[in-house]
Structure formats: structure tokens, C-alpha cells
Amino acid sequence: MPKEKLLITGASGLLGHALCLQAEQAYDVYGTCFQNEVMVPYVTPIKLDLADTKQIAQCFQKVQPQAVIHTAAFSKPNSCEQQPEKSRLINLQATVEIAQLCAASKIPLVFTSSDLVFNGKDAPYYEDDPVSPICVYGEHKAAAEEAVREIYSKATIYRMPLMLGAAPGFESGFLAHMVRTLRNKERLILFTDEFRTAVDTESAASGLLMALKQPGVLLHLGGRRRLSRFSMGCLIADVLKADHALLKPMLAKDLPMPAPRSPDVSLSSERAYVLGYAPEDLVSYLERSVPGIVQ
């Protein structure tokens, strides 16, 4: 019996990479990419510019997917603040197009939103809390959530936290950067006043695949720990047995950046836990993954 065709957008990202690895056993996986290559065997790569809605329609026509997980995004808040039209095209318009195509075919759609739809003043945040974005990226993700709900009632929306992951070809990721800096005995500046419920990409991927069986819900896929970036750095330093003196604490407010910063967007993910989402303890994940990150 042939496997169902699963289309994963953003398959060349860290989350997309983890998704492809987990999905290829059960699905015939097609993964979209733009600047980077898809690094997973048995996944059919598709070059796709999400800023071009015609390309999205052509992709659907070519693949004829039976389910879609839409993870691709223009996801750096500072870049979105500086290039708001690019953010609108990729984070909002492309999501609208994908939702319309999935609704027309009546196939499962999972859309990954962000904890940055919240202003960070009233954490922990629950699924029913009103959105309150303060940056362009958060505004477009919040608008995309609303559009998806209006277009396709059976779509599933998962709000994602900060994600830590490691994989070949992803030397520039947040986790890889911290590991490389500490191994080189270089100073690492990390904020003490910004909090997230970070999760590893493998746990997040398993939650997203679970979402294919949960149509029409809005859920949070956060980790179990509320941590600042500085605290995350301390955990990584412990795993590496690195000198904590290399970690320099800093307040986000003391470093001006283009995008306003939400101080605490910790997510409550109890609803997802009840449904079977079981994120790995972050320390356990770091102990398992950090030694394998190349210099």
C-alpha cells in the first residue's frame, strides 16, 4: 500500500530537518527549500520561493499532497522589522495561499505559529489568551493564525517556542553557535531578562506529526522549563564542562535592536501534554546532542 504524500515546507530548516527524519518512515515526504538544501535521504526536495504564490500553487499541483505541515517562515524578528514587506509575503500571504489550497483539497494542514504573538507581559500564556504582538514578525504570525482559522476550520495551529536543535549542515543555529563559542573559550553574551519555554526540535517534530491527527485545534508546543538565554547557556556550559566565566549576562534593554523584545513569552502546553506530547527534558537532550556538534 503506497504511503500518503506529506508536504513539509521549510524542510531545510532545523525543525524541518527533524520532521523529515521522523516522517519518512510513515509518509512519502516532499520537502520544500529555498536557500539551503534538504539534507535527509528519501525526501524529495522541491525548490520553492514562498514569496511567489504562483510557485506555491504549482508545488501543490505537482506533488498532490495528502497532508501538509507548514513550518517555513521568515523568522528572524530583527530582519522582519527591517523588511516588513518580505515578512508579509512569506509569513502571512504564503500561509493564506497554503491554507486555501489545503481547504480546497480537504487535506490535513498543520501551521506553525510562534510564541511571539504575545507581548511578554503576562506569562505563562494559554491557548485562549488574546494575542498581543509587539514586533512585525509577531504581527504577521498572529494575522496568519486568524486567516488560517477563517479559511479552513480543520487546520491545526501550533504555537512554537524557541527551539534548540543540531544537525549536519546547521552550524549557524543558536545551539551550535553557543557550543562552538564555548568550545573556543570565547566570551558568550546572553540575555538574563528574556524568558522562553524552549524545546528541542526532535520533540517539537513529534508533536507536529501528532497534530496531523488533531484537526481544528490550537495548541502550544512549549518545553517544560521556563529559562532565560543566559540559563540555557549555563546548561550548555555544564554539559561541555566549560568555564561559566565565559558567559556574560546582559539585559536585552541595554542592547538596542530593530525589533521590540517580548520579555517573557513562556507557554503553557498542558493541553498538548494531555494529548500525548511529551517533550524531552532539555538537560537530557543537551547531554545527548551537544557532544555530536562539530567544531
Image (cartoon, rainbow, N blue to C red):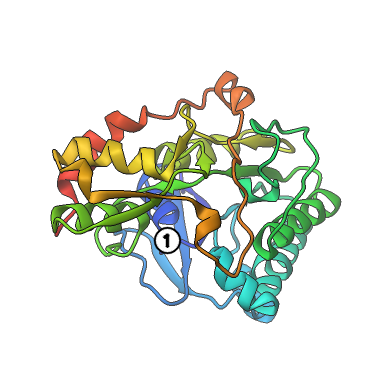
Amino acid type of disc 1? Gly
Element type where label 1 sits in the image: loop
Which residue sits at x=64%, y=24%? 271
- Of 277 and 284, nearer the camera is 284
Does the rendering let one see residue 117?
yes
Q: Is residue 243 left or right of residue 283?
A: left
Q: Position of residue 131 (x, y in %)?
A: 77, 45
State the count of labels: 1
Identify residue for label 1.
13
- Of 253 and 223, nearer the camera is 253
Q: Is residue 193 above or below residue 279?
A: below
* Badge 1 density bin: few <14, some 14–19, many ≥20, Cα 10 Å: many
Which residue sits at x=51%, y=27%? 277
Residue 87: image quadrant is: bottom right
Q: Is residue 10 left or right of residue 152?
A: left
Q: Is residue 86 above or below residue 180?
A: below
Q: Is residue 206 above or below residue 168?
A: above
Q: Residue furthest right?
A: 150
Q: Is residue 221 above or below residue 178?
A: above
- Of 287 and 278, nearer the camera is 287
- Of 207 and 87, nearer the camera is 87
Q: Position of residue 269 (x, y in %)?
A: 59, 28
Q: Residue furthest front?
A: 254
Residue 265: image quadrant is: top right
Q: Position of residue 44 (x, y in %)?
A: 40, 65
